[in-house]
Image (cartoon, coloured by chain):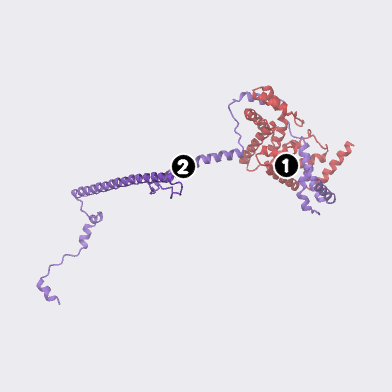
Chain colours: A red, B purple
Amino acid sequence: MDGQVASDERLSRYRERELIEGAQRGCGESAHRLVDAYQHRLHAFVWRMVRDRHDAEEVCQDAFLRAFQALEQFDFAYRFSTWLYTIAYRLCLNLLRRRREYSGDVDLSMASSSGPGDRESGVVDAIADSDEARRLKKVIWESVDHLTPQQRATVLLFYREALSCQEIGGILDMPAATVKSHLHRARSRLREMLSSELVDDWSVVLCRQAGSVA
Amino acid sequence: MFMTCRHIRQLHDAYVDGELSGSLKAEVHAHLLQCPECQRRVETIRACGDVIAGDRSEPVLDSGFATRVVAALQKVSPPEAPTLETRRARRRRLWRMGLGAILPAAAAALFFCVLIWPPMEQEIGPKVVAGKAVSGVEDVVNPALDAVADTREAAENLNHLFRVSVDQAHEQVLRASEEQARKLAEARLDQGYKPGVTVWDVLFEPLTDLLEPPPQPVEDPAQEEVVRF
C-alpha cells in the first residue's frame, strides 16, 4: 500500500453526529464508518509527528479506541476530528517523550531516511512530478522534522488540516496566541534552515508546472 | 509611509496568511516587487506551506485497519476510561490536591493556636448602648435604660459572685498544694534526706573533709587578753 494516496471521506456535521450517536449506542457499523472517515488524515498527521510506521499505526489505533471509549463525554459543539487529534497529539507526545528517555534526543531526520521520501516509486507530487520537486519536498520535510513537536503539530494542523489558531489551540491545549507564536517561530526556523537556492529551484518547478499545464 | 525591510518582514506571516487590510497588503506587495530578499523570504514560506498542505507522500494504513479497531473496541471492557489528561486539567487537579492538603493543615494550626493562646479577659457585664435620652422620647427611652441598668446590675452581681467563687477555689487549691508539699517534705525527711543537702554535697563529702582546715585549738582567754592591744 506504500505510496497509495488515501483520501478520507469528508463527513457533514449531520452525518458525523448520526455516526457518533450510533457508536455511542454500541453500533459497530457506525464506529467502522467513523474510523474509515478519519483514519488516513489522522495517520498522516501521526506519522509526520512520530516518523515511524509501526508507532504511527499503534498510536492511531490507541487514539480511536480511547476516543470511542470516552464517546459518552463527547461534546457535539466540537468536531470529532478535533477530539481525535487531541487524543492522538497527547499520545504522540508521550511516545516522543519515551523515545527521548531511551535515546537521549529525538532526531526525526534520521527516521526520515527510511520514510517515503526515499522510496523509488509512490511519491505523488501534488505540484509537479520532477526531480527538482522531489528534492525540494524532501528538503522541506526534513526541515519540518527538525521543528519541535509543538511547532510541527502546529504547522501540520495549520497547513494540512487548514485549522484556525483557535482550533489548533483546542487540540494542543494552549491559547490561540501561543499557537500563533509557535507558527511564527516554525516559519522563522524553516526560513533559516532552507537554503537560499530553494526559492530559485521552486520557481523553476512552478514554471515547469505552468508550462506542462499550458 | 515608507516601510523598511525590517518593518515589512514583521508583516510577512500576516501577508502570507491573507490577514492584512487592503492598504497594508498593497504596501507590502509593492515592497516585494522591488525587494528580492523579502520576496525570497515570502516565497520560501509559501513553498513550505504548499508542500505541507499538498504533499501526500505519507504511507497509508491498510484496508483492514478499521476492522481491527472495531474488533479491538469490542474486546475492551467498557468501564475502562481514557487516562488522557491535559496540562490544564492536571494543573487544576494538582491545585485541588494542594488545597485539600493545605486547608486541613490550616484548620489544625488554627485549632492549636486557639488551644495554646492565653484567654483574654473579657468584660462580662453588658455594655450600655444608649446614651442620654433625647427630649421627647424620654417615656420610651427611660424604661429601656432602666431595664438595661437592671440587667447590667444583675450581670455585675453574677460576675462578682463568680469572681468570689473563683478566688475561693484558688485559695483552696493553694492550701491543698502547700499541704501536699509539706507532707512530701516530711516524708523525705523520714526517709533520711537532709534538707538543703544536694547530691553534690553527698558525692564530694570526703573531698570536702580533706580540704577543710583542721580545727584550731581554743586559746586561753587570758593569753588572748595579753595579745590584744
CA distance separating discs 2 and 1: 54 Å
Q: Quadrant of the N terminus of chain A?
A: top right
Mark 2 packing: few (<14 Cα in 10 Å), some, or many (20+)? few
Please name which of the two marks, 2 or 1, marks the residue nearer to the observer.
Answer: 2
Q: Amino acid at mark 2?
A: Ala
Q: Residue furthest right?
A: A214
Across and down, in percent, residue A209 comes to 86, 38
**Mark 2 touches mark 1? (CB < 8 Å):** no
Across and down, in percent, residue A51 comes to 70, 37
Q: Quadrant of the C terminus of chain A?
A: top right
Parent chain of label 1: A
Across and down, in percent, residue A100 comes to 63, 41
As drawn, A175 above or below B224? above
Secondary element under disc 1, as helix, strand or loop, is helix
Q: Amino acid at mark 1?
A: Val
Left or right of B217 on screen, residue A154: right
Secondary element under disc 2, as helix, strand or loop, is helix
As drawn, B92 above or below A31? below
Q: Residue furthest front?
A: B136
Residue at the disc numbered 1: A144
Tag shown at residue A75: none
As drawn, A75 above or below B111? above
As drawn, A44 above or below B182? above
Question: Image point 19% across, 65% down: which residue?
Answer: B213
Near-viewer residue (B39 or A191): B39
Parent chain of label 2: B
Quarter of the image holding residue A164?
A: top right
Does residue B26 show up? yes
Q: Residue furthest bottom?
A: B229
Across and down, in percent, residue B91 comes to 58, 40
Does residue A110 show up? no
Residue at the disc numbered 2: B107
